[in-house]
Image: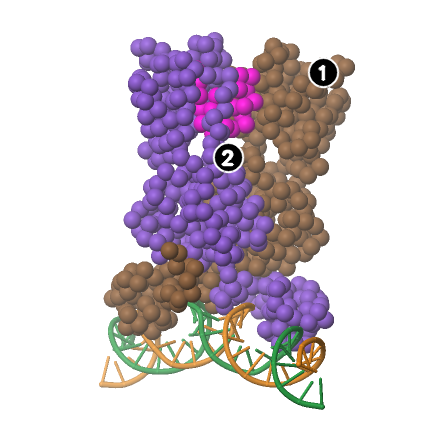
Chain colours: A brown, B purple, C orange, D green
Amino acid sequence: MDSHENDKPARRPTLSQVARIAGVSEITASRALRNGSVVAKATRARVEKAARALNYVPNRLAGTLAGGASRQVGVILPSLSNIVFADVLKGLEARLEDDGYHPILGISHYDPKREEQLLRDLLMWRPAGLVLAPAQMTEATRSLLGAADMPIVEVMDIDRPVTDMAVGFSHHTAGRAMAHFLVGRGYRKFAYLGHDISTDFRALARLDGFREGLAEIGVALSETRIMQGPSSVLLGKQGIEALLRDASERPEAVFFSNDDMAVGAVFHCQGAGIANPDDLALAGFNGLSIGQALPTPLTTIASNREEIGFAAADSIVQKLRGLAPQSVRRIDFRLVPGATA
Amino acid sequence: MDSHENDKPARRPTLSQVARIAGVSEITASRALRNGSVVAKATRARVEKAARALNYVPNRLAGTLAGGASRQVGVILPSLSNIVFADVLKGLEARLEDDGYHPILGISHYDPKREEQLLRDLLMWRPAGLVLAPAQMTEATRSLLGAADMPIVEVMDIDRPVTDMAVGFSHHTAGRAMAHFLVGRGYRKFAYLGHDISTDFRALARLDGFREGLAEIGVALSETRIMQGPSSVLLGKQGIEALLRDASERPEAVFFSNDDMAVGAVFHCQGAGIANPDDLALAGFNGLSIGQALPTPLTTIASNREEIGFAAADSIVQKLRGLAPQSVRRIDFRLVPGATA
DNA sequence: ACTATTTGTGATAGCGCTGTCAACTTTTAT
DNA sequence: ATAAAAGTTGACAGCGCTATCACAAATAGT
């Protein structure tokens, strides 16, 4: 029988009950249970005993409303479909938990309108801070953030103007770095294969950077192919197959929007008897472990996603403690020369 | 300059300010902004206009404290290191958001003590419901759950006695099903290769079921190898290598604790020139897309993780609406005969 | 010894909102 | 027209906690 279905009182024990049993005033009980405040040792022990006896669980809604700090941090991410943002979230959670904070989560699905609604919703909980990996902010989103009286970190990229703080790296620079690397390896005919990029503007930034990097050497990107739908191994497999089928002239190297896509291509090549990198060079982005465990480890750019999450949470926590963390923290990417390019 | 650092008032607009501007009482403004309550059309319009003008953001802490329902759901998962629980979380979030709920997240890292602490923390926020994928609950955890006056769903497996509700499938049965399948394929010499199983009791349940399934046909598991550390593609690669090196007699088929490990084995076989399944059959668990995209799709058991999350959230929401969802919802696994066994 | 601190505790007043009950106004039924 | 029902609004109290100020008791200073 579920007690939440019957309408009897049966409320949870309150601080005032704890105080009564301990024989002190409410406020003293409050101080005793929060560490930091001055309370006589014996009193604190009595209050703690009473709390234990009652199975007292403090009500943070009341505590926060009455003036305490919130200890919740709003987190808005665009997706949980691949491991990338799960990694970020993992890092965030780890650092937040260290200081007793908890993330309230929202997933925007790369939809600015949804992001705005989520922000509105999360703000209602008066969180202590906010972490977002913004898609493409609406005006309202920007204005809500501007009016929000709390530390805010934008994670993943540091290419755009920052509201309060940012943690990540430049995706544009990352794309450029890969262009330079591949050119350095001697390749001259390039293709790009990505997933639906209209929503994922960080992937777009990498493509831009890649183009720019090539242009600096006087090379042009011969083909850009965008697949419909979210990125996946299968999509990469299908994509490379189509690309090779349709291409009038086979590219020497292909840069993918991410590792998932690139791994799919590796699988296709294995099946089709195409040697990497000799027949075709492949490069991904993210540095997923799956790519590194391949018989031919994937050439890619590793992003320290968990560390980004960790640093973002750390910036929030620091600021809440009154410190002044850097406004922009760079957690840089690392080019991983594998065996596929 | 961050306004949260200066001590000036600058509080957010409150309902009472909205009410004053709209020329109504506080409670009428409250009713106007929540839909459902009876308020004259014109009045509602006036209040909404005032709220917009002030950029009013309701304070749900106050609202919930005063008697409203919480609209936060506590979620405790054991890990975010692989895509499995990220998928569950994705499903959870999607369903919760449909009804305006938001997950507050905690990661237990398969540590019962940590799980208990997280539960304690989340309970302080007086969530409307609770979702957990329990590791190994402590007595205190069980007692906290018993006293918690809200819908609770345990997700992933339905093998154990349930506190309130459960959504998932039997991992024991899944292991058994794979045993039957592999025996049916004609294999008779079996090995199991897993990651550190002491903490992951669902993997342990699959192993038990696998053993039992074999025993039913009169076959024994010839070798069980447990690798240290969390599961990963690399760990599977190293594991299969070691297993084959040390084995006095090569097994005909290997069952892995999950797809990550199995994919690692596939990679090792590719590199070592071992044909799957003829030289060695491999079977995983989870049905990750990466396994299905392999040149030789992995034989595995697909778990509908996102659907589990979705159904779990749905059960919570239903119960909060006064409905009575089934206490145990089975979201069954599906054996996926691939090309590796 | 007597004041100046420090330490420990409490009374009071909210935080911003919603439940409850009561009151008033308009509509509908007879 | 008049009672009953429906529609609309407000006064009040209180959710469970903490900030603030005030005061008593214990300790230190000279």
Chain of the residue under the numbered disc 2 shown in the image: B
Residue occupying the point 57% across, 54% down: B100
Q: Counting other residues with Cα less than 10 Å from the Cα at mark 1, is it few (<14), some (14-19), or many (20 or more)?
A: few
Which of these two is toward me, A88 or A125? A125
Would residue B297 be counted in the magenta stretch? yes
Picture disc at residue B304: 2
For the question of whether residue A272 can be seen, the reply is yes
Residue in the foreground of this view, choosing between A172 and A227: A227
Quadrant (top left/top right/bottom left/bottom right) for the N terminus of chain B: bottom right
User: Which label sits on residue A43?
Assistant: none
Front residue of C29/A274: it is C29
Which dot, 2 or 1, sits closer to the camera?
2
Tell me the SS state at disc 1: helix
A93 versus D7 height, above or below: above
User: Does the stretch in magenta take in B73?
Assistant: no
In the image, residue B51 sits, relative to residue B236, either above or below, namely: below
Task: Please name the amino acid that badge 2 sits on.
Answer: Asn
**Horizontal relation, residue C3 to residue C27: left or right:** left
Above or below residue C4? Residue A122 is: above
Residue A245, numbered circle: 1
- Region rendered in magenta: B281-300
Q: Which amino acid does label 1 sit on?
A: Arg
Q: Position of residue B341 (x, y in %)?
A: 46, 16
User: Residue B337 placed where, x, y %?
Assistant: 49, 21
Q: Quarter of the image holding residue A228?
A: top right
Chain of the residue under label 1 = A
Crowd rating for badge 2 (residues with CA inside 10 Å; few <14, some 14–19, many 20+) = many
Q: At 47% from the left edge and 34% from the top edge, which residue is drawn?
A: B332
The image quadrant that residue A45 belongs to is bottom left
State the SS at label 2.
loop
Q: Position of residue B307 (x, y in %)?
A: 52, 39
Q: What residue is shown at x 33% (from left), y 50% (from top)? A: B142
